[in-house]
Image (spheres, grey):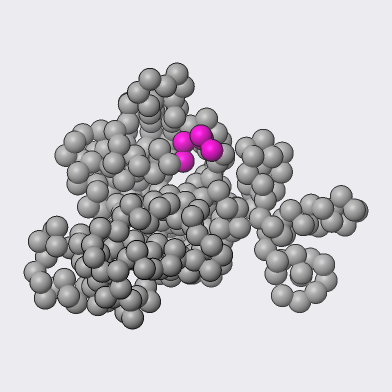
Amino acid sequence: MTSAAGSPNAASSAAPLLVLRDLHYRYPGAHAEALAGLDLEVRAGEFLAVVGANGSGKSTLARLLGGLDTATSAQRAVACGHDLLTDRGRQDARRDVGVLFQNPENQLVAECVEDDVAFGLENLAWPPPDIRDRVDEILERFGLVELRKREPHLLSGGQKQRTALAGVLAVPRRVLVLDEPTAMLDPIGRAEVLAAVEALRADGLAVVFVTQEMDEVVGVDRVVALEKGAVVYSGDVAGLFGDVRLVRRLGLGLPAAGELALELSARERVFGTLPLTLDQLLVALGGEA
């Protein structure tokens, strides 16, 4: 994922849309908390990646941010001004915060693509002419116009996930939470979805991108790393991947270019800053990007 469209400075000056303070969540019957005193702020226009090993609390966090689950306790839990600790607040938050999960099959509900994109708008009782205009706009944006009459089960994995994403964003949102949206896709489908997500950076949405693919983290405004349900790192991408000991402890790995650079470092190749993309690695090796 490239960084050209992101603007960390703009995001840092915007008001926070998501605020969590000392948030705890424990699944019924579990001995340990899934989220343990978690603190997090996400601002309008910010593109944030959330990383961590399996069981670190990433998907639990995604569901809580979308108002789909209730925290066990928190000093504060707010999404777009809605109190996530109340039933009414979570209901209102689901209007402003869209969530896309790993498996698009779970979010495709209609008999054809255009009906699926219209589903949320119909539930909100938009006037039919406005629904048609909005669906046309969203289909065009996500490259789905030629597929509008296609049955979802006939789509490729990438097409299904783009359709699910289009359905989430047909309803105007302020925050988008993506819970490992490429995890079930082949390389072509993954590229399709990442391109669609990258295009969202111009919209001013706050985007929370949960992923275990470290190459997908490069270029975001900020990365948060979770361990045992708590934030153990929050900062820029270079700062996280520059701390190789922490990366290894968290079981994250590095972007492919970073792993290759480390192998070269072991063979006495010196890098001033660890390259994280192939272009950066090529420049560091004396070539041209």
Q: Which residues are magenta?
A: 54-58
Would you say residue 275 sits in the magenta stretch?
no
Residue 51 picture location, percent across and down: 54, 45
Specify the quadrant that holds the N terminus.
bottom right
Using the rendered view, name the quadrant where residue 165 is placed. Answer: bottom left
User: Residue 86, relative to residue 239: is it above or below?
Assistant: above
Q: Which quarter of the rendering shows the C terminus?
A: bottom right
Instruction: Give the residue displayed 51% in from the left and 35% down from the top.
Output: 56
Q: Position of residue 105 (x, y in %)?
A: 35, 55
Q: Position of residue 180 (x, y in %)?
A: 47, 51
Which one is nearer the viewer's eye here, 205 or 169?
Answer: 169
- Viewer-proximal residue among 283 and 143: 143
Q: Is residue 56 left or right of residue 281?
A: left
Which residue appears at 79% of the width and 52% of the height?
262
Q: Position of residue 181 (x, y in %)?
A: 45, 55
Give the residue displayed 28% in from the left and 63% down from the top: 167
Residue lying furthest right: 268
Asked whether residue 57 is drawn in magenta, I would say yes
Quarter of the figure with residue 53: top right
Specify whether residue 48 is in view. Answer: no
